[in-house]
Image (cartoon, helix red, strand yellow):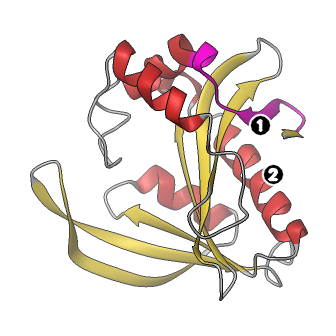
């Protein structure tokens, strides 16, 4: 699977991406709001080996884990993930993380928009959700720019890295996409 945009290529992550992925998965500021700790090179390699099996959305237990690749340099600058959270009700979730050296350039918006296009074009996704730590203001801006609506605030519902965190739930319906 490959999705092309003007500046990016979205494709499956592989073990060969280890050095690029380490640049953000090994960065404490980048993983601050993500439910895993800073990773070493060996840990990133283990995760990528496992990620090579996340290549379909054919069941509720399957996922896609995609590299965000900068077309100009072929460098992996981040990743996207999606899975069904409720296949019966056609609901998928999305998540993303980006190398800090490539933030504030619109790459996440471009990549996430392409993933949303792909998910809704499949015909079996009606609703996409994103759970975001309320302290992660840049991530909130990303989904709001793309037309997601905030549906809920869950107060101290997630114990993450030694502290209780509150989360926003954002959602986007297929009929809302590209109509905003």
Q: Residue at x 11, y 56 (%)?
A: 163
Q: Residue at x 32, y 25 (%)?
A: 39
Q: Is residue 28 left or right of residue 50?
A: left
Q: Quadrant of the N terminus?
A: top right
Select label 1 or label 2 by which is in front.
1
Quadrant location of residue 127? bottom right
Q: Is residue 73 left or right of residue 59?
A: right
Residue 6 x, y percent position in the rendering: 90, 35
For the residues bearing labels 1 and 2, Cβ distance under 8 angstroms: yes
Task: Please determine whether, in this image, residue 172 is positioned above or below residue 134.
Answer: below
Foreground pick, 14 / 141: 14
Q: Residue furthest left?
A: 162
Which structural element holds mark 1?
Answer: strand
Mark 1 → mark 2, Cα distance in angstroms: 9 Å
Task: Please determine whether, in this image, residue 25 is positioned above or below residue 166.
Answer: above
Residue 17 x, y percent position in the rendering: 60, 17
Q: Is residue 79 left or right of residue 126?
A: left
Q: Which residues are magenta?
A: 4-17
Residue 2 x, y percent position in the rendering: 85, 38
Nearest to N terminus: mark 1 or mark 2: 1
| Few, some or many residues within 10 Å of mark 2 (<14, 14–19, 20+) | some
Q: Which mark is residue 10?
A: 1
Q: Which residue is mark 2?
A: 114
Foreground pick, 15 / 6: 15
Quadrant location of residue 107? top right
Foreground pick, 91 / 33: 91
Q: Is residue 179 left or right of residue 34?
A: right
Q: Residue at x 62, y 14 (%)?
A: 16
Residue 55 x, y percent position in the rendering: 70, 45
């Amino acid at each position: 699977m490959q999705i092309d945009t003007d500046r990016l290529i979205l494709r499956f992550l592989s073990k060969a991406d280890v050095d690029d992925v380490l640049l953000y998965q090994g960065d404490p500021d980048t993983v601050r709001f993500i439910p895993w700790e800073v990773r070493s090179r060996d840990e990133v390699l283990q995760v990528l080996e496992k990620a090579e099996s996340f290549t379909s959305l054919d069941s509720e237990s399957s996922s896609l884990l995609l590299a965000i690749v900068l077309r100009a340099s072929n460098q992996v600058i981040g990743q996207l993930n999606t899975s069904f959270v409720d296949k019966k009700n056609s609901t998928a979730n999305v998540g993303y993380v980006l190398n800090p050296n490539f933030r504030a350039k619109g790459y996440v918006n471009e990549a996430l928009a392409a993933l949303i296009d792909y998910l809704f074009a499949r015909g079996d996704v009606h609703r996409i959700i994103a759970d975001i730590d309320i302290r992660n203001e840049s991530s909130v801006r990303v989904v709001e720019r793309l037309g997601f609506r905030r549906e809920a605030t869950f107060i101290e519902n997630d114990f993450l890295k030694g502290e209780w965190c509150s989360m926003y739930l954002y959602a986007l319906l297929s009929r809302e996409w590209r109509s905003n």
